[in-house]
Image (cartoon, rainbow, N blue to C red):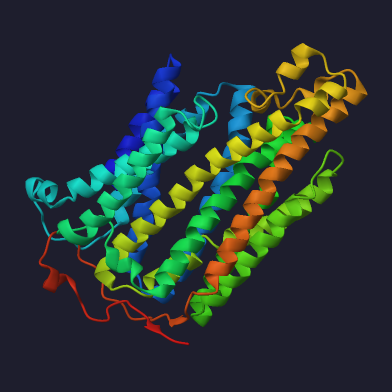
Amino acid sequence: MLCALLLFFISSAVCATAKTMQELIIGRAFQGTAGGGLILLVHVCISDLFSLRQRSLLMGFMEGIWALAGGIGPVLGGLFASLVTWRWCFYINLPISGIAALLILLFLDIKHEHTSFVDGMKALDWFGIFTFLGFTLMILFGLDFGGVLFPWDSAKVIALLVVGFVMIFAFIYSEAKLAKYPLMPMSLFKRRTNVAAFSVVFFHGFVFISGEYYMPLYFQAVLEASPLRSGLLLLPFIVTGAIAGVFCGVIMHKTGKFREIIWVGALLLTIGFGLFITFDAYTSTVKAVCFLMVGGLGSGILFEAPLIAIQSQVEQHNVASATATLSFIRNIGVSISTIVGGTIFQNSMNGRAAFLREAGLPKNIFDQLDGDSAMANVMLPGMLKERAWEIAAKQAFAYAMRNMWITYTVFAFLAFMASLFVQAAHLGTEHTETVTGLRKKEEEVVAGSGTATPSS
């Protein structure tokens, strides 16, 4: 965890002092890697230290903190960019990282057995890591390039996607047959609840990120909100999600029930994003905020409950692997979602070309609203002098985003359908703390430790 925090500190410093776009991109890449590691390791530490019943409460609180940070972050970023400089978006991470490192050194007490660096490196599933990175990058690049930089039927896109899917099978074979300590144990997928919960997590990741990523686009293009105001308008989505996450953590802690919570979350997610489909060029800010709150409730509920469902089905020594797998599946859903959403938006804006021409928009303005350029010109509709041009541009943006919301609603409904296959389980209050480090498998496995008993 300290290594991840150090990498986050260094990469934030690189971003803050970057003099070129290349330096900023490299710094952001390492910062994202470190940030993802920190989020995952916090989950793992909670899972190692506390029983299922206790961790449901703590993870609920953690979700609330994370959601609030995600809501406050864009607002602070807008303030820094407006009042001082965007570099403070990264400078602020430096003292926070230092405080976090001090707290870890003083208070985090994890049991572990000494493992030499060489033995640790030998134990890593290197072939699994290679195939894992290979299929992830190739498929994401293929989806990102397709229809944007290259046609979907181009050799480059086809090669990336085909080789990426081949490497998926290589990864599965490696994890099932070759790896002594697999990166993603295939045994995690042998239980119905795990498969259902992983599916919910993927669909949830695919859907929820669109609210945070694309809703500000609607606020700025259609409601004429400034970047700072669009961040403030997004707060209802974030805050309701945070409150829902904490509240559900308390419920799971008190009652030991998670299945019904997942059902409710998936249903609210479907309803909320279904309501987004009604957004048009004339939608009021009040209506948009109210509908955002419904979507935020569903989104917030589904962050931690599926993790508890999965952890209730695995042995304690597999909890870290299960948690990492869930994090990976959610991140894959998030990554694919932003690509798919962008593609739908671009194609939909291209599809409104005839409509914009009929509205009489001059060519120089029309060119700024085509599929490739529209996302970079979200403030343009509110700047147009002719009222007819303004309405036409706003309607084009609203139409393109409506197509996105239809897609995301379908995936939210798939999350609800998958949630119906999650089985209930008893969340135990007894726990044997996990000891980290390389040990023989028979010494790792403590029968029944920290697991739950499935029930009907």
For the question of whether residue 12 can be seen, the reply is: no
Name which residue lies at 81% across and 25% down: 356
Name which residue lies at 57% across and 68% down: 417
- In this view, the residue in front, 105 or 246, is 246
Is residue 36 rendered to the left or right of residue 116?
right
- In this view, the residue in front, 430 or 145, is 145
- In this view, the residue in front, 103 or 337, is 337
Q: Is residue 448 above or below residue 39?
A: below
Q: Is residue 295 above or below residue 252?
A: above
Is residue 98 rendered to the left or right of residue 277?
left
Name which residue lies at 39% across and 52% down: 328
Q: Is residue 284 above or below residue 204?
A: above
Q: Residue furthest bottom?
A: 456
- In this view, the residue in front, 58 or 299, is 299
Horizontal and vertical percent for residue 77?
58, 32
Horizontal and vertical percent for residue 278?
80, 50
